Amino acid sequence: MDYILGVESTAHTFSVSVMSSSGKILSDSRNVFKAPEGSGIHPFEASQSHIRAAARVLKEAVEESGVPLDSMAAVSYSMGPGLGPCLRVGAVVARTLASSLELPLVPVNHAVGHIELGCLLTKAKDPIVLLVSGGHTMVISFSGGRWRVLGESLDLTLGQLLDQFGRHAGLASPCGRAIEEAARLSDRYLRLPYSVKGNDVSFSGLLTASKSLLDEGASFGDVAFSIQETAFAMVAEVTERALAFTGKKEVLVVGGVAANRRLDGMMDSMAKRHSARVGVAPIGYSGDCGAQIAWTGWLAHRSGIRVPVEGGAVRQSWRLDSVDIPWRD
Ligand code: AMP
Ligand code: MG
């Protein structure tokens, strides 16, 4: 059995995980930076939080796994995309480990990490993927050696839509779970703009209209319900089109917003019409975590992917459809 260590640090979460080559998560320790109420993630402040937490999180992950550091086969890290100051903390930790332990350093694309961990945990083989998080809103399908983007948001991500709406209501980011809880108590749909363009979506008009409804005195629960119904129907529509177009029979929902039960319910009823199966990453592993990097790092390592320690830089913008995936056919 081989073991690999993965370091995640693209945004709010600093996490280290140790996984076995059989796909078992032996540990996944995390520290999540919390922004003050009403404000978003400040990249520099998040990176300072990562620096303070790094040693503790690393120690916890290694101890809990029971695998000594010098028994790892490789060290993997999120090379991007993400916030520069945050990415650099993870890269420094991973480079230091790889060079002191004389291990291969394996770069991982964070979005590919969400998908590959989702496939592992839901046993999806060749799904249409809906990746909905703070950093991404994409409908993705594997073809010709790469994950291909069939549709995406033209402006805000679904996570940003929910977080910016929540912050306008005075909540602290991330706001998705509080919005879900408030929405569950309402069934009053207030009309909001629905914007699907081809196979892409746009959320900025929806955000503006939702904020205005709040400002005009509508209840938070009713607007929370309405924003979810509208935004989730939009991503369900573009996912449905991708499913119908490719004829695939599996849908995988990954990213932090995958934790939302209403979204999962909508995806389920959509997929049923196509006799497709929906897999949703388990709540603890739908958002950012070291395991997504450790597992994808293992797949990449097995395919011979590595960078020299001095080349272990970061890529703030690194689209997943530019990444070759030699481990899939
Ligand atoms: P990630 O970038 O993958 O860690 O995802 C973070 C995003 O997921 C944030 O925008 C959160 O508000 C959102 N999120 C987390 N839990 C939920 C939930 N239950 N419903 C909707 N969005 C959620
Ligand atoms: Mg993410």
Image (spheres, grey):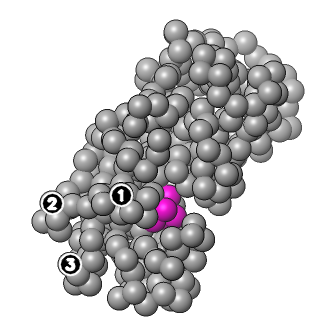
Q: Residue at x 47, y 52 (%)?
A: 113
- CA gap between label 1 and label 3 equals 21 Å
Q: Are marks 2 and 3 in contact (CB under 8 Å)?
A: no
Which SS class for mark 3?
A: helix
Q: Residue furthest top?
A: 198
Q: Which residues are magenta?
A: 290-295
Q: Earlier in the sequence, mark 1 or mark 2?
A: 1
Which SS class for mark 1?
A: loop
- CA gap between label 1 and label 2 equals 19 Å
Q: Earlier in the sequence, mark 2 or mark 3?
A: 3
Q: Residue furthest front?
A: 329
In this rendering, would 58 be left or right of 199? left
Q: Count neighbours of disc 3 (C-alpha within 10 A) and say few if under 14, some if 14 to 19, many if 20 or more.
A: some
Q: Which residue is mark 1?
A: 303
Residue 240 sits in quarter: top right
Q: Indicate whether 251 appears above or below 153.
A: below
- CA gap between label 2 and label 3 equals 12 Å
Residue 286 appears in the rendering: no
Residue 116, image x, y percentages: 52, 51
Q: Residue at x 77, y 22 (%)?
A: 274
Q: Which residue is mark 3?
A: 99
Q: Which mark is residue 311?
A: 2
Q: Mark 1 or mark 2: which is in front? A: 1
Q: Indicate whether 204 appears above or below 294.
A: above
Residue 213 sits in quarter: top right
Amino acid type of the residue that numbered disc 1 sits on in the rendered structure = Ser
Q: Earlier in the sequence, mark 1 or mark 3?
A: 3
Q: Residue furthest left?
A: 310
For the stretch drawn in magenta, what is the main secondary structure? helix
Q: Nearer the viewer, residue 173 or 32?
A: 32
Q: Count neighbours of disc 2 (C-alpha within 10 A) and say few if under 14, some if 14 to 19, many if 20 or more.
A: few
Which SS class for mark 2?
A: helix
